[in-house]
Image (tube, rainbow, N blue to C red):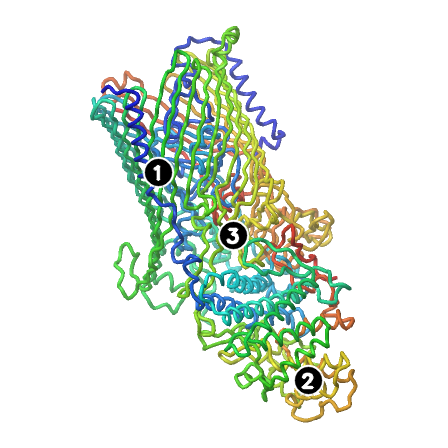
Amino acid sequence: MYSIIQKQKKPALILIAFWASISAFAQTGSTPKVTAEDTSISSVGDVVIVGYGRQSRRNLVGSISTVSGKDITDMPAPSFEAALQGKAAGVQVIVGSGMAGSASLIRIRGASSISAAGDPLYVVDGIPISQDYFMNRANGSNYGAGFNNNPLASINPDDIENIEILKDAAATSIYGSRGANGVILITTKRAKKKGLKFDVSARWSSSSPTKKPDFVNADQWLQLYQEAWQNDGKTGTPDLSASGIRMSWAQANDPKNHTNWIDQVIGNGFKQNYNLSANYMGKNFALKGILSMDDNGSFIIGNKYNRVSERVNMDFRPMKGLNIQVSQSLSRGTNTRVDASWAGGLGSAMSTMLPIYPLEQLYDSASKSYITPVGLQTIRNLKNWRTVELRSINNVSVSYEVNKNIHLNYSTSLDYMDYNEHLYEPASLIKLYNSNYKQNGDAKWFPSWTMNRNQFFTAQYEKQLSRNHNISFMGGTESQHSITHSKYVENFDATGPIDQVAIPDTAKISNSKTPYEWAFISYFGRFNYSFKNKLNFQLTSRWDGSSRFGRNNRYGFFPAAAVGYILSEEKFMKQYKWINFMKLRAGMGKSGNANFDNYARWGTITPSGNLPNYNGQPQLAPARLENPNLRWESTVNFDAGVEMAFMKGRISTEITYYSKVTSDVIMNVSIPVSTGFGSFYDNVGGITNKGLEFSLKTVNIRQKNFNWTTNFSVAKNVNKITSIGVYSPDAIGGGTNDTRVVLNQPVGTNFLVRFSHIDKATGAPVYLDINGKETSKWDPANRVAVGNVLPKAFGNLANTITYKSWELNANIYFNYGGSIFESSVKRQLSLMTDWNMDTRVMDRWQNPGDDALYPKMTLNTFNHGATTPWINTDLWLQDGSYVRLRSVNIGYRLPKKWLAKSKFDAAKVMIVGTNLLTWTRYTGIDPEIARDFENATDRNMSGSITYLTTPQEKSVSLAFNFSF
Amino acid sequence: MKKTLTQSIAIVVALFAAASTFTGCQSIETPPPNELLVDDAIKTTDDLQRLLNASYNEVANTFGGFASMMSEMQSDNLSMPNNNDLRELYSHNVLFFNTTSGSFYSILYRAIFRANFVQDNMDKVADLSIADRNRLLGEIKFIRGLCHFTAVRMFAQPYGFSAKNEHPGIAIVTKSSTKPNPRLSVRDAYDAILSDLKDAEGLLPAENGNYADKMSATALLAHVYFQMGKYTDAATYASTVIDSKKYSLSDTVNLFTPAASGEYIFKIVSTGVNDKRSGGYSDIYSPGNPTCQLSKQLWESFKVDLAIDKRLKLLTVVNAGAQNEFIKSEMFNAPYFNVPVLHLTQMHLIRAEALAKSGGDLAIATSDINAIIARAYTDNSKLVASGSTALQIIDATRSQRRIELLFQGDRTNEIKRLGAIESQNIYVRGHRWDCEGFVLQFPITEKTSIFEINPTGGCN
């Protein structure tokens, strides 16, 4: 694939995209007639959901992006949040891997958290939902390893009416200590049309990887091994046991034994999605019912996510002024799991499952044991492994209009999530590892279930004081409590999974269930003042108390003030006829992040029963030291923007500058162990994010039968860590990915020993020491900041063309800057171990004088100047820029006259392609990377780092929508 | 539905108040399950005792073999190990990601933290008797002294390395807190260690079961002064222990057997195979192909006395003559045993050399070293003649120390003392005693703006 980035300097790319859309507009000379609804600033009249209320978009003073439900359901995605990519400026979405149901990584306006979760707060119909990406870790299962659970996967995208993304303090500070990383408000569908109406949709898709991992074949691998053997000064037949391989050289060379393991695990994914919704609206009662089934097979053989869901949203109006809304949903998500990443499957095919190993294990009669690993297909076929989630999000909301000025609202919600991991390994599988195994099989069950309840009460007072002055005041109180229980059950002698075969008492071990609990109590208020409908002023504040905050900081206060000025209403602006609308807005405020360990503040002691005796006497050991000062991360957010529309609304644009200054950053600090502890949650650091967001919407052509609009957005963010207290960069490890917190560098800095070149004479790598001097020794003391995982800019170019009944949509997403660190290639290029080799190894040093990219083959890491085979250098670091044709969508709306005879009101056929093309200079598999993470810190610091990561998927779908 | 504004406001206020009470019922106190809150857990003297027992538990994890391995590996007693981490020790180039060295360091300081935690929470027990308070404080200070002393010897250049001992030492931690601690000079570290141990000596009772007692502190003080080259003090403290007649030299040459328990001044307790705190020693010395094997060079020098030295019977040559020949120890083969940390043999060796070095009574020095020699050999050929010079006594004592304390983690400390105090030009594998890599490296997380870790790059 030839790259356009290769030809162009990268900043130019964005300009080209920009220019392209402008010039396209300029070339269309026609001046079609304009209808009122047609203007692109019709959105000015839109109502936007804000925290605990609604406002007209025109009078909005905060920075809020709206994404419609249609944008989310139009394309297949592992989970709804993936579809947000490119839909709003400043919202970075790294879509998860091609594994079914994988989680995306979303960051709004940069990264301002380190050990507290950096994800935005998700609120569904008023309840901040449970969003734990590490449930399979919390319940003690190692089997979640290699793949994080996705708490959003069980949410049905077809339930979503729209999504508001709250970005600045004016919008988020009403969410107080939880708003700092942005808030995503999800509103589910309610009945909209009078009478009884139905919608049906169906979609079928086929998926494959964006790029297949490219590894050497058996013959090449053996040649490389021989070369390493000879380079190490050894002669004769190479001995594979030096790398822990038990096959003889002759066996390894026997083509009968050779297998392409990548082909054994990658196939074609099949997906199907069906959706039926019913709409009824009567005089005092309305109902929306949705039934959906989504069967999302990934291209990894044996892996799929199946979701069946139901929703009933009802509205009652028993008397004038009283409105009761009931929203209820239940979904069941079943992820049929396979091993991935470092835990096996494709990860093994890319590492320890060598192409010299046969499909069926080789048995050695001399040692009476198998000398090759169990085939990946055998593991997949015999292992019965599922995660089953039940999720039910329910809300009852009662609102009462006391009079035209006073409005009361009470809302109570329950978000129930039940997450079960089932693993069953039959004797036929276990015996392949352990020939002495005598039982029937091993069944494990890791259940955990979360009850997350909240309720809030708000009272709103609105009054038009005079013709020019409008005020409104909203005050409210909210409480939320969440408790998760988890346990672990194992049947050592099982004939089937625990959910299918009853467990005999004798075979059962079960930990007592352990709760994991948090709670918030909050008080909040919002005051709005509007002058002549052109000057809007807003004050918000919230007090948050949380179970996570230390003794000395039980409540946090989060105020914000913002102003919006619709300049185009002023008389002096009327002379500029080409300006249809112009609004200036600015706001400043404080919000927080309180999404960290529930129990970090407490000082506790491990009871004697959980510790061994010493000297025959019981022990009591301190478990954690109290942190009475522990509190929220605090972000002061300044935001200023201009919104404009020109030329009868054919061009509309928005430019926003923001600055987020975060202090008291929560770090799970690896404190000096001389304190007696390994780690400790503390408010240590400071981080700033400064950025610009620009979006432009142009109606390039507007004719009766032909319309063309372009949406372009780009955001640039500059991130910097301004304080790490007294600590060193290594006090916060980004998991095993060698990203660190480095003062004056961005969050997620690649902190690596620098590679200089390959010594032409010896083929050994030459490194640079801390002072930039060449050295042959690898020493972690020479690590420096060499890159970072955050992009410099990213954005999206969307074009929509409609011609008669046809519609074409194309989304191009681009990511500029940011580094990709390939954490696994240290063992796939040049150092010969028991790992498979990447085909890039062909560019290695072989003979004196070679000017090679990669060092000489060797079996001994000492020859690369290191004491361990696990050394990281910036040789494995690359530029992460890419441009991707994210989606193409061709739709055909059946003409009304065809439908007239049928019962259908509307019918549409679509063909959708995702990720069909990618342009990049990155030489690895796929430049869009969200790997499996170890914990929240890792999730914040290690995006764009691969470790045997499954590539993204591309897909082609056929879809039908009908209304009747 | 007509209401006045006042009425409406009244309704809102009332509802708001009701809702606030409603949400206010919700508790935001959610303590962690399966753990005790500090205030609930510490009520009696027994609770303090149990907390301190958790500190002893870490002392056991350190001195049940771990400390020995870390010291021996850097010395000239062992052959090259087949383990990446230990090979870094062997080649005197410990990187700060070395997890073996890092966990050794962290266990030492966890013992210190847990001791400090007892000290900082004593006041929670209202009816703590003065005797108990003194005893607990004495044990806390003893553990602190023992662990700090071990840390300063392993992680810093030795006492005597620089003229005023102002070179970087270790963190001295005397309070339980998560605040990082500064790296003090070696002089300040030794001052703190001496002060703790002298306090402990004053506070501890003469008898304290299997835990540290007064004599434990006295014996440790002898070690500290000996390492510092303060030989008069070392001899005095060693004499106090020897002259107390509380301990007697064992007849057996293997001190890691119950028969030698009369020698134990402070020991790690194993109560059975399921509670073997001696596993650290057994795991590294006893397996068929153990991690720690005797240096062949050293074996060659020992071999001349093979016929008469009973201690050499505790060494086995495996695969003799073959290419994969190695020499292993048979000292630690019992399924479980108590581990002597401080014992009488050390006191005699310290006193013999310290008296000879400081112009003390050479007759006592001679009898000290001859007591060890007499036990070790089948004949009297090695005995030091009465009337021998101080130098002769020192020579004999040093060569006995090498073999008597073999595998007990003494050798590296001895090399440092000979280099720093006795000005010997002593080398191990071509690396001088004072080269940069001849100390363990701190784990990288130790590095803060107030704590600079050791130089990197090893010796050369």
Query: Is residue A832 left or right of A558 when viewed as pictured?
Result: right
Q: For the point 64% across and 58% down, which residue is it?
A: B95
- Residue A69 can be seen, yes or no: no
| Residue under the image location 72 percent in, 48 percent down | A771
Task: Report the amino acid beneath label 2.
Answer: Lys
Element type where label 2 sits in the image: helix
Task: State the residue lying farthest toward the bottom.
Answer: B379
* Front position in the image: B389 or A798: B389
Q: Nearer the viewer, mark 3 or mark 1?
A: 3
Read off the residue under disc 1. A155
Q: Which mark is residue A520?
A: none
The answer to whether residue A379 is seen in the rendering is yes
User: Looking at the rendering, in which quadrant would you find the N terminus of chain B?
Assistant: top left
Which residue is rendered at x = 50% and y = 15% of the image?
A582
The image quadrant that residue A16 belongs to is top right
- Disc 1 to disc 2: CB gap under 8 Å: no
As drawn, is B16 to the left or to the right of A732?
Answer: left
Mark 3 element type: strand
Measured as percent of width and height from the top left, residue A375 is found at 43, 57
- Amino acid type, label 1: Ile
Mark 2 residue crowding within 10 angstroms, few (<14) / some (14–19) / many (20+): few
On the same chain: label 3 and label 1?
Answer: yes
The answer for which chain carries disc 3 is A
Between residue A658 and residue A227, name the one nearer to us: A658
Mark in the foreground, 3 or 2:
3
Residue marked by disc 2: B303
Q: CA distance from mark 3 to mark 2?
A: 53 Å
Whole-number angstrom distance, CA of label 1 to CA of label 2:
76 Å
Q: Is residue B338 above or below residue A688?
A: below
The percent coordinates of residue A91 (x first, y second) are 48, 32
Q: Of the numbered discs in the image, which one, if any, rests on residue A680?
A: 3
Residue A523 location (% of width, % of height): 39, 35
